[in-house]
Image: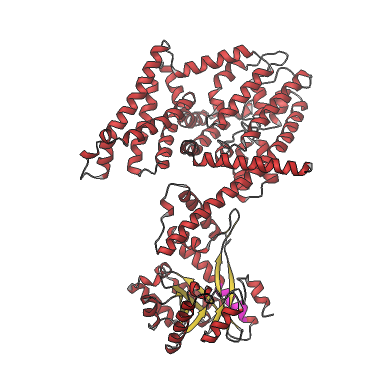
Amino acid sequence: MNEQQVLMNSEQLFTNRAMELLYRIENNQFLSVIRRALTMLMPMILTGAVAQAILNFPNDAFYLWITTEHAWISVFLDMVNWVTYGMLSIILAVTFAISYSIQRREPVDKMIFYIVTSLASFSTQLIGVKEDAMWDILGNTGYFVAMVIGLLSCELFFRLGKIEKISLRKYTIGMDAVLVNAIQSILPAAITILTFAAFQCALLHITGGRDIYTLWEIGLEEIFARVGDGYLSALLYTLLVHIFWILGFHGSHMMENVSLGHFSLVGGSITFSKSMFNTYVMIGGCGTTMCLLIAIFLFAKKKRMRNLGKLAFPIVIFNTNEILNFGIPIILNPVLAIPFICVPVLAVTLSCGAAVLGILSTTCNETSWTMPVFVSGYIGSGSVAGVVLQVVILALGVWIYMPFLKMYGKIYSVQMQEKIERMLEELQKCESRGENPDFLHRMDDTGMVTRSLLQELKIAIRQKELCLLYQPQVDADGKYIGAEALLRWNHPEYGFIYPPLIIYLAKEGGVLPDLERMIFNTAIDAIRQVSRRCDRPFKVSVNITIQSLNWDIEEYIEEKLAEYHVSTKYLWLEITEQDMLTNSEQVIHKIRQLKDAGHKLLIDDFGMGHTSLMYLQSEYFDVVKLDGSLVRDLTKKETNQKIVASVIGLAKKLNVKVVAEYVENEEIYQLLSAMGCDWYQGYFFGKPMPLEKLLEKFS
């Protein structure tokens, strides 16, 4: 085995293990709760970050302008900062409760009790805290505790609610839903809140009045006092900040007291200051994520990732990376965790090394964390050397991020494809049972993927990213008589989407009329173009659903036919037997209007059921399209041959034409021809093709 094969095998092994770990994270309910809760914070954190970035904009003249000449601006930005970062922990307690109740698939009216319990449980940790520290705990300081208590309190509340005697269910018979949930939550909520209150009181008693925040700060100070100043201290600080971030905690906030008290602007041989951290490590935010952003623009092929990069760019240049942390996500991501930690460690090592070698001054000039790259390098070092070091860090960082970014892209694609496939399996099962799925309202992976696809479908319709393919239909002599227009959506991430899923999304998302306008506009234009080259009548058939008849579809079709100068007899309309089961007066009226306008109507997926025969004898339908399951197994099942022969014979007596689809080979074609089938459609005569290729057949 050569070196390249060994390398490929090693990469495949790592990819498989990373995939397995990602699956565990995705399927672990607690880790899913954490990631979802933190993602919910993104709008608030970004709003606060933008306010902070403006307040700390690296320009003295601008700072004076907003603090003196227009002081109301700084007051306003301080207010925005306070209601976001200043309330971070208390809002986090809320998002954890919401995320947890979603994970447990609790109804909305039960979700509120998770929120109340989580908030109250977190508030117990304010017992014994000094008044001046209380507001800090509601903000950044309490982030870690809010996260832990939010998760634990919801889990305890849930488990207590499962205990029959505690839930008081027997007392709620006959009551309305809100009152039932309120009564059933009384004891679980009370026990949960009292548990955390007791914990706080016990902690204060044992530690002599020291709360968990104070203990945390004392512990960190003790550790860093033992490590001392210099490279090891800087390395430990960098590692802890980024490990906390990967685990879902806000590393910078958790280590804030260390950065303020331990990394001050003092000289020394290898003293590492907070300004050096801002200048050489926080390039694009924690994780030196400017390197990741550049790698995305250079190497990411998926549209999702590139769009995320474009969205993140305006704020990453000011070293705010929450969009990347929560959007990719980097948090709880075992693949991107490696470069997220390694690149900052490299940056610390290089900057300390440059100071030792005398390339940089041992005392870094003070720089704001919002100062853009290169500007911070020049101001911080007082020379071009700082800029050169930043360039080196960025180049090496991009090189480190690149393979992990590519690997994660592959893993993400496989994950999403499997989620899509699971959703399609459920959809097809529902189709076989004649049921309408309810994916959009589900809170699991299927629900989230469906809602995401719906939003993307709306954009795709507006931007005309969907298309039609045309599968030829021939007569008994093998001559083209028309084609069926088939909807296709080539999704940039998932490839071609199952057409019934597109229709389902359009129906449930309320965009079916928009989709069908695009379909009819494209199909009618195709008829016009083919007619110019074809020396005989050529029709295109388009599928419609029962929901299609709930808007003014006939008026739109008439308008487009007039616009393209196409006769109604060349636009055929297919509707499935299942859709016709509604048989409402409005449906019958719309069908009659379309029939009177000159369109030929087809019953799609025609079988031998009672409903099929009922519509066959009606005056509305001119053509029946044999159910594909009958045609596919025609050569294998004698029963199918008898059914198809009966349908064709009955149709001839009623003067109704028959189309057979799924004609895949000559044997099926010969059987159908012997039975007297009128028209044929299938791979034996041609696969679905773009209009350009269809036009070539008439050149």
* Residue nearer the viewer, 246 or 356: 246
Q: Is residue 160 visible?
A: yes
Per the rendered image, the range of residues in magenta is 523-531
Residue 182, given in percent of the width and then of the height, sits at 27, 37
Residue at the spot 53% in from the left edge and 39% down from the top edge: 24
Total marks in image: 0
- Quarter in which the C terminus is drawn: bottom right
Q: Is residue 260 left or right of residue 346?
A: left
Residue at the spot 66% in from the left edge and 29% down from the top edge: 344
Give the vertical position of 526 relative to 250 (above or below). below
Q: Is residue 648 left or right of residue 340?
A: left
Residue 529, given in percent of the width and then of the height, sits at 62, 77
Quadrant assignment, res 52: top right
- Quarter in which the N terminus is drawn: top right
525 part of magenta stretch: yes
Residue 126, given in percent of the width and then of the height, sits at 39, 21
Residue at the spot 67% in from the left edge and 18% down from the top edge: 232
Quadrant assignment, res 664: bottom right
Q: Is residue 312 visible?
A: no
What coloring was used for the rendering? secondary structure
Q: Is residue 693 left or right of residue 637?
A: right
Residue 694, given in percent of the width and then of the height, sits at 64, 75
Our reading of the magenta stretch's main secondary structure is helix
Residue at the spot 51% in from the left edge and 41% down from the top edge: 26
* Residue nearer the viewer, 586 or 170: 170
